[in-house]
Amino acid sequence: MTSTPELGPVAYHRGEFTDARAAQLPLTTQGLHYGTGVFEGIRAHLLDSGDLAVFRLGDHLDRLLAGARLLRVDTGATRDQLTDVVVELLRRNGFAADVYLRPLAYKLGLLPGTRPGVGLTGVSDALSIVVSKLGDYQPPQGIRCLISSWRRPARSAVPVRAKITGGYVNNALALDEARCSGYDDAILLDDRGLVAEATTANVFAVRDGVLVTPPATGDRLPGITRDTVLTLAADLGIDRVESELDSADLLQADELFLTGTGCGVSPVVEIAGRPVGTGRPGPVGAALRETYDQTIRGRRPDTRGWLTTVALAEALR
Ligand SMILES: Cc1ncc(COP(=O)(O)O)c(C=O)c1O
């Protein structure tokens, strides 16, 4: 298990491949001051062949570009061009290991003649992508979650269908509260007191053999891993329903797990000081975790075109 990711030597920064450690930004960068940026978390895994496979790259780029449009950030690149950039970046970094890609599109600096302020027009844009070596970071034996005292902002206040940098202050406060209280992660409720999501993951419960996750339409990021897990659950013939959950549902669940690009399918074995089910990862989550891992590593047929294979140089394989 890796805790501190190793930054790859090459970044893509403002239209060029460059030394990741030397790349710089002005102190006046608007995205830094106002949270006017949008990012993605994407993973690529080492295949048995020795090549890398990026998981659902097109879906991640679509979400990034849609978020960028919302913030009036012109990335200067199409989805196809960004696909080529990601493939080339992985080749140049040459990690023959599982990696994490972090594209970030953001507002940069005021254009001449623009009045200062929290504006989205009259401000230049930029896109950067870094790569880190990152294996599994959540323990397979499960994590412990707090139900946060912080509420997830409503989608009417902060858009939820994109990973907007400014919105993550909420997630940071919730994770900080959880860690300071001795937990691994936090589950946030929405304004109505219903389960929104974890700090960087969606929430699934299992009750009487039925998989339950809140609908993609609420105050939560509709995760790509969430969609993958629902699809794989259908493949495995697991009964599933998209329905709101409340705190009592969490406390009464037979199984709980989180899903996200970073954490994969991550069992929750304790919630708010109580064991979940037996206090150990349950069978439904375990089956989905196993199937998910095989899928992202190309050990099941890629019938849905989810994998973008990147051939690494022969010397690296
Ligand atoms: C707030 C939040 N919810 C859910 C997720 C899971 O999304 P995905 O499965 O697309 O990675 C993330 C991912 O980072 C996230 O930041």
Image (cartoon, rainbow, N blue to C red):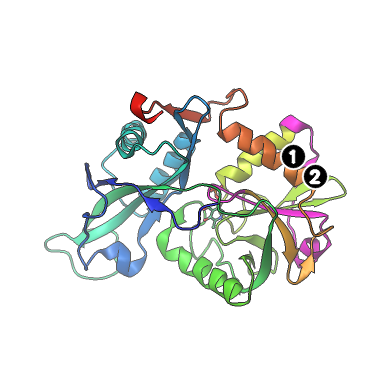
Residue 313 showing in the rendered view = no
Q: Is residue 245 magenta?
A: yes
Out of 165 and 93, give the one closest to the viewer.
93
Decide: few, some or many residues near mark 2? Use Cα within 10 Å; few <14, some 14-19, many ≥20: few
Q: Answer above or below: position of 297 versus 15.
A: above
The x, y position of residue 183, in whole percent, is 64, 70
Disc 1 marks a residue whose amino acid type is Ala
Q: Secondary structure at mark 2?
A: helix
Location of mark 1 (residue) = 287
Q: Which quadrant would residue 18 be assigned to in this image? A: top left
Please, what secondary structure does the residue beneath circle 1 have? Answer: helix
The C terminus, quarter of image: top left
Q: Which residues are magenta?
A: 235-264
Contact, CB < 8 Å: mark 1 with mark 2?
yes
Whether residue 269 is situated above or below residue 41 in the rendered picture: below
Q: Residues within 10 Å of mark 1 (few under 14, many from 20)?
A: some
Indicate whether 189 appears above or below 127: below
Query: Residue 232, percent across and down?
Result: 68, 35
Could you tell whether 261 is left or right of 241 in the image?
left
